[in-house]
Image (cartoon, rainbow, N blue to C red):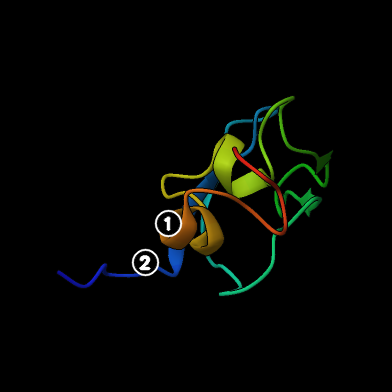
Amino acid sequence: MEKVLLLYSEIKCPVCGFVKREKMSENSCEWYYECSSCKEIIKPLKGDCCVFCSYGSVKCPPVQINGKCCGEESV
């Protein structure tokens, strides 16, 4: 069975709680994200590869496809 790749995630700012739907890159991770509401620069939580894995409604595409992220051995 073929996996369905989800390219959109709702990312929630951990500072102000603002939620925005964003398109994710298919082959790379977002290590930094600027909240469009409070302008805070957010970074992934320890152990996560990107901001979508930490604060998004959907994990990043590399994790969806491989279960690991951007050259990492495991997530």
Residue 23 against residue 46 in the figure, above or below: below
Which mark is drawn over residue 64? Answer: 1
Look at the numbered discs 1 and 2 and tell me whether their residues touch, using CB distance below 8 Å: yes
Q: Secondary structure at mark 1?
A: helix
Residue at the extreme left of the image, as rendered = 1
Residue 22 against residue 63 in the figure, above or below: below
The three-letter amino acid code for the residue at tag 2 is Leu
User: Which residue is rendered at x = 74% and y = 24% of the image?
Assistant: 46
Question: Residue 57: x, y in percent?
Answer: 42, 44
Q: Which residue is mark 2?
A: 6
Disc 1 packing (10 Å; few <14; some 14–19; many ≥20): some
Question: Residue 37: x, y in percent?
Answer: 70, 48
User: Which residue is rendered at x = 70% and y = 59% of the image?
Assistant: 70
Residue 8 against residue 57 in the figure, above or below: below
Question: Residue 22: x, y in percent?
Answer: 54, 64
Q: Secondary structure at mark 2?
A: loop
Question: Residue 49: x, y in percent?
Answer: 69, 43
Q: What's the distance in space between the residues labelled 1 and 2, CA to CA?
A: 8 Å
Please identify the quadrant where the N terminus is shown. Answer: bottom left
Q: Nearer the viewer, mark 1 or mark 2?
A: 1
User: Which residue is rendered at x = 69% and y = 27% of the image?
Assistant: 47
The three-letter amino acid code for the residue at tag 1 is Gln
Total labels drawn: 2
Can residue 56 be seen here? Answer: yes
